[in-house]
Image (cartoon, grey):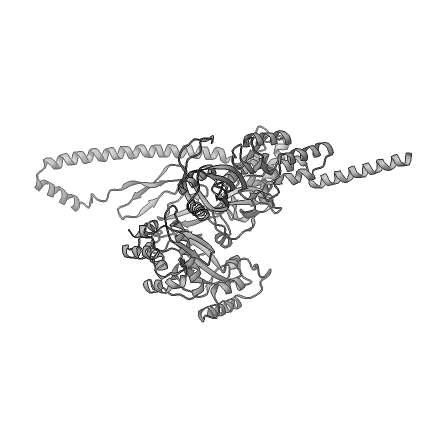
Amino acid sequence: MDMIVIKKKRIAIAKRQSLEKINEGMGRRSDYVKSGFINLDKPSNPSSHEVVAWIKRILKVEKTGHSGTLDPKVTGCLIVCIERATRLVKSQQAAGKEYVAVFKLHSSVDGGVPKVIQGLEKLRGALFQRPPLISAVKRQLRVRTVYDSKLFQYDESRNMGVFWVSCEAGSYIRTMCVHLGLVLGVGGQMLELRRVRSGIQSEKDQMSTMHDVLDAQWLYENHKDETYLRRVIKPLEGLLVKHKRIIMKDSSVNAVCYGAKILLPGILRYEDNIELNEEIVIVTTKGEAVALAIALMTTATIASCDHGVVAKIKRVIMERDTYPRKWGLGPRSSQKKILIAKGQLDKYGKPNENTPKEWLNSYVDYVVKKEEDIKEEIKKEEKKEADDDNSKKRKLTASADNSMQSDTASPKEKKKKKRKKTDEGENPTEEVETVAAESADADGRWNYFRRTPRDTITWSAPRIPGKMADEQLPAGWEKRLSRSTGQHYYLNIYTKESQWDVPDKPAEPVSSSGPEQVQCSHLLVKHKDSRRPSSWREDNITRTKEEALDLVKSYREQIVQGKASFADLASKYSDCSSAKRGGDLGSFKKGAMQKPFEEASFALKVGELSEPVFTDSGVHIILQSLLVFTLEQKAFLIESYFLKGLKVNGSWIYSIQNCLEEFIVEFPIVIVDRKTFEDNLSREVMSYFNAATPVFQRFPQVMLPEYNKHFIIPLANFKAATKISESSYRRIAKEASDPSDVA
């Protein structure tokens, strides 16, 4: 009997130990819960606020939030964010939604199911909506976009149907059902509604019920088993999987949590196709979300630069000091910590009565110094402004006296005075004139330019960190302090070029002629003397500069002879990360690339292939693709697209080749790589084509086989958008068989 009891105790101890190991491996439960979210299947009747409050009480947390309000009778996907994950609530509320609705029409429809489908198709695009009476928000007119819709089923005997809709956040499906009844001319209303997707989470992505949450918490509290709880609560990173990522070094993570700028040296890896002002996520090497940010550089710019601010922080997600601090570890900081520990400095690191003289002699309080400098500068400016006011008053009084004298003097006396002034060498036009600059400097105060008799301009440099103003420089130059070397250098404010030697000539403004930005593709071959002699193709590049040049020349010869396309060669042999996009760098402005590369890119004509170009990265060949069309070219492309399009079974079949030849004749350009040029041209046509896409009119349907999409464009809006001629517009409308548009 005793043996049986001992055996049972051993089994219980073994189970407890195994459970403790599982929980220890999974980490602390509280940390996991406080950084997670629940894809909840909201039940009918309780409001979204009540559901979130219940979950807060069940999980015993301090803060919860949801991704978008659902009416009490509506069921479906409601993303509930917990504690730290509530920082993502706003980004999830703005995400698109998908619904399945049951509607009822007030009477039968003459056309049956096809008529109902046609009515749903009309309710796509930008719609005017007023919230229904049952809604708790202010009932004012608003615009919401319906992306797509589909009729699942319609019962003609009961005048009831089910449809699916994908729409913008804040759309009211109840109002859409009423509008559907109005479009069909019979009236209608919504009977039932279920949300099947909210942002990135859908009802197929492990939805949990309120019972699941309650059972998971009970299982943890009574049996210390977290497995069920971890199945219900997902990590917050699951809401950000569609964001493009930038991976930071572990040494930079905590600095970002404290609000530091996201600089290029702190980045390990980044994703392709990052665009300007796009929302991205900053993550650690383990995949933990650090912050949401707005991109200030494209992928092409990041790949070609070695310094600069990559992104602007929008919302910090990670708690501070999750990763160790890596700043303040230098010899000066270490010495300061020792003095603080000994009591020879106060807790803020400032001197006290026990501070050694050696430290005081070498210590500079930059905060106090900055405040004193600012006060001195303000006093100088106030004195300068007072002197300027006095001089202006003296000039005004002198000019008034002169005018009074000139009015009273005779014409002969005026001529004598004028001749006397010129004889004595005076020139009334050579007065020094003070003109306020058009823009304020970094401190919010105005710079002043003094125009000298020889029309040269001396400029007082703005007071910003790193910029020195202790000597007079020629116009257009700034003296700055290098952070890396600690030496002074001189910056040309027009071309952004820098030099170590003191300039002796004024900088000339750059001519505004030529394009502001270009779009280029390139093929890069690195060599052992490159700035970074490694690539995605080779970890260690050993070829010489001459061998790299020979390779580039052979690739260029293949492209010119038509043996291979530029994109194919770049994707196979380019040592740049842009090889994944066929060498496409996207658009960039002056100052974004290395100087030799920039000069060669902006010197090329559209479709022209460069000679080999040498930079610090290696040897390039560059192909300029068409980026910016003029209004005339855009109108010609769209008009040519319609007039040259082939009408098959009532649909317009898009083919870029149909209008390319006519475009080349109208606007002569040199084309080296035809396929790449056609791809860029079709991309531009499609983007401009989508900009003119509206709703709510009768229109021809246009099909684009390359993109497997249908774009709907009413002719009246098309005419206004493209500014085509009246005769061409009538011809298009006639072929579209739309009498209302022709009239």
Residue 512 at x, y = what percent? Answer: 34, 53
- Count of numbered labels shown in the rendering: 0
Q: Quadrant of the N terminus?
A: top right
In-front residue for pair 55/518: 55
Which residue is at the far front?
157
Q: Residue at x 89, y 36 (%)?
A: 4
Residue 342 at x, y = what percent? Answer: 64, 32
In-front residue for pair 714/198: 714
Query: Would residue 62 appear left or right of 132 to someone viewing this image?
Result: right
In-front residue for pair 368/519: 519
Query: Would residue 318 appear left or right of 1 to someone viewing this image?
Result: left
Quadrant hosting residue 661: bottom left
Which residue is at the far top?
353
In-front residue for pair 213/733: 733
Q: Is residue 258 visible?
A: no
Q: Is residue 627 visible?
A: yes
Residue 442 at x, y = what percent? Answer: 41, 39
User: Is residue 478 depicted above or below 83 in this figure?
Assistant: below
Query: Would residue 509 appear left or right of 91 to someone viewing this image?
Result: left
Q: Residue at x 51, y 54 (%)?
A: 303
Residue 397 at x, y = what percent? Answer: 20, 33
User: Is residue 515 depicted above or below 201 in this figure?
Assistant: below
